[in-house]
Image: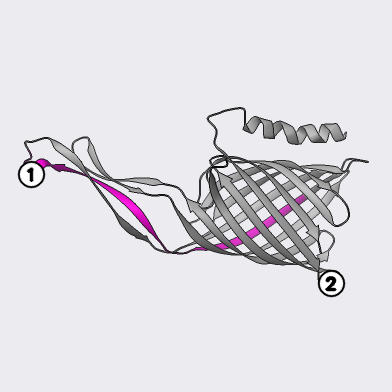
Amino acid sequence: MCAVAFAMVAMPCSQAFANDSDDFGVWTSIDASKKLSDKVKLGLEGEFRTTDGLSIVDRRSLGVSLSYKPYKWLKADAGYIYMNAYEPEKTSIKEEVIEGKYDKNVDHAYRVDKERLFVSATGSFDVGRFEFSFRERLQYTYTHAAAVMEDKYRWEYVGGNIDGEPEQVKKTEAEYKGSKNNTTLRSRLTVKWDIRKCPIKPFVSAELFTRVDEWNFHDKIRYRAGADYKIDKDNSVSLFYIYQNANDDDEPAGHAIGASYSFDL
């Protein structure tokens, strides 16, 4: 059965590399936790993500959280995350100024700082050797202002003569991007398989993102498949594969593979 569990993890990860045209990222994290009482736990997390393979650092983040577990089947937590994120180059069409010719702006890629607050509740129950859990998380993200270099392409007639040939003029200058806010509800269903006499625990999950501030239901869906391996009572590792079906302010659509290490202090 352990071999089956390993195959369940390896198969989707290998598929991520099957198509050369698919961009993918790598997500890694380290989690530390400390019990403050029988029901309260303090958590610390550091995360590092790449995009476009390993060529671009997509996110660096540090977070702290506090969880409370009043019952075996119920957990509530709240936390804060500070992120430094990558914003890719973006092209926007301004207007058609000459028939078939459009002015446009091209924002250079840049990095921006973000701060996030979240609260969540997770309920879980067992059916045979399968554990089902459902988590609702409400998060608020504040994106700091940033100065961005922008290429402005404008079509103009040479010398102002509309009977002549138009040419495209490029000007590069700094553009100020104001701060912005994002409030999102994340609904995640996870199923874990507790295999008898096997240290590997496979899991699958689906997470629905809904922009609450814009009432944009079904903003994107994140699918995850992987397995947890408990090294001992204080240490564990997790390997996983992720697919996201849409772009948003946090990540690009596409594939990612990842690993996380967790330990209790």
The image position of residue 63, as x and y in percent, is 65, 63
**Residue ID at (68%, 53%):** 29
Residue 41, image quadrant: bottom right
The image position of residue 264, as x and y in percent, is 81, 61
Report the span colored magenta: 133-162
Q: Residue furthest right?
A: 197
Q: Earlier in the sequence, mark 1 or mark 2?
A: 2
Distance in Å between CA atoms under marks 1 and 2: 77 Å
In the rendered structure, which amino acid carries the disc numbered 2? Ser
Q: Nearer the viewer, residue 37 or 156?
A: 156
In the rendered structure, which amino acid carries the disc numbered 1? Gly
**Residue ID at (75%, 52%):** 261
Q: Is residue 177 above or below residue 52?
A: below
The residue that mark 1 highlights is: 159
Q: Is residue 156 left or right of residue 147?
A: left
Q: Quadrant of the C terminus?
A: bottom right
Q: Is residue 251 visible?
A: no
Q: Is residue 91 above or below residue 45?
A: above
The image position of residue 142, as x and y in percent, is 51, 64
